[in-house]
């Protein structure tokens, strides 16, 4: 990450209709905030979508971006969860070149990473891998020797961790929690 660039993870519930993403990205552009990753999908509520953004920019540009998002009419709720107790994952589909003799070695590597095989062709294998950025990057790096043909990544999706004690809210750390639970802006493995 470049000097002076601050990264934040934002989740938002938005109306599922045309133009919403354009208005949101326009806000980011006007504030000088870069969208590093974006994942969007239907939510549990009909007519609404959930978005997870990882954004980067100058500290003064990104620190209040969720407040700015909440002012947009199509945004129902936006929250900066960067310093909350969260669970997050990234999904990748990876197609790698292989011949008959390489197939066994590649499949053994996939077992170490707990990767799902989603397609096998005569000259290639496709994998599905969910986890943190470093896990996905490491698997891709190991496959480079065989010839990675395609990589598709979702970017980060995240949700607040459920409360573990009475009296604390979802996403809050317990006062006695000395664990190494992931905090979103520290690009770690994706939590457990």
Image (cartoon, helix red, strand yellow):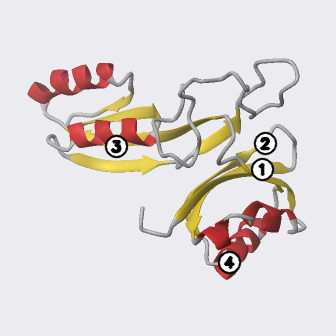
Q: Spatial distance from mark 4 to mark 3, Cα to Cα? A: 30 Å
Question: Residue 31's mark?
Answer: 4
State which quadrant residue 53 falls in. bottom right
Query: In the rendered structure, are the residues bearing label 1 and label 2 in contact, judged by CB atoms less than 8 Å apart?
Result: yes
Q: Spatial distance from mark 3 to mark 1, Cα to Cα? A: 28 Å
For marks 3 and 2, the one nearer the N-term is 2
Where disc 1 sits, the SS reads strand
Question: Residue 43's mark?
Answer: 2
Q: 126 left or right of 47? A: left
Nearer the camera: disc 4 or disc 3: 4
What's the residue at 48%, 46% (across, down)? Answer: 187
State which quadrant residue 27 falls in. bottom right
Between 134 and 186, the one nearer to me in the picture: 186
Nearer the camera: disc 4 or disc 2: 4
Nearer the camera: disc 4 or disc 1: 4
Work out whether 116 lies above or below 64. above
Residue 188: x, y in percent?
46, 40
Query: In the rendered structure, are the residues bearing label 4 and label 3 in contact, judged by CB atoms less than 8 Å apart?
Result: no
Residue 103: x, y in percent?
18, 26
Residue 37: x, y in percent?
55, 57
- Mark 3: few/some/many CA within 10 Å (<14, 14-19, 20+): few
What's the residue at 59%, 61% (across, down)? Answer: 55
């Amino acid at each position: 990450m470049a000097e002076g660039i601050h990264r934040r993870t934002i989740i938002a519930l938005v109306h599922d209709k045309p133009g919403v993403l354009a208005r949101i990205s326009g806000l980011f552009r006007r504030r000088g905030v870069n969208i590093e990753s974006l994942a969007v999908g239907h939510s549990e509520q009909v007519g609404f979508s959930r978005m997870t953004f990882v954004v980067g920019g100058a500290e003064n540009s990104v620190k209040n971006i969720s407040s700015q998002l909440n002012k947009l009419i199509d945004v129902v709720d936006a929250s900066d969860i960067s310093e909350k107790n969260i669970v997050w994952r990234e999904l990748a589909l990876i197609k790698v070149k292989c011949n008959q003799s390489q197939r066994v070695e590649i499949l053994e590597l996939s077992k170490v990473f707990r990767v799902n095989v989603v397609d096998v062709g005569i000259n290639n294998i496709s994998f599905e891998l969910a986890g943190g950025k470093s896990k996905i990057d490491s698997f891709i790096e190991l496959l480079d020797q065989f010839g990675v043909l395609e990589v598709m990544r979702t970017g980060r999706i995240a949700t607040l961790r459920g409360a573990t004690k009475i009296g604390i809210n979802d996403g809050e750390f317990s006062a006695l929690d000395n664990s190494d639970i992931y905090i979103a802006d520290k690009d770690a493995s994706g939590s457990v």
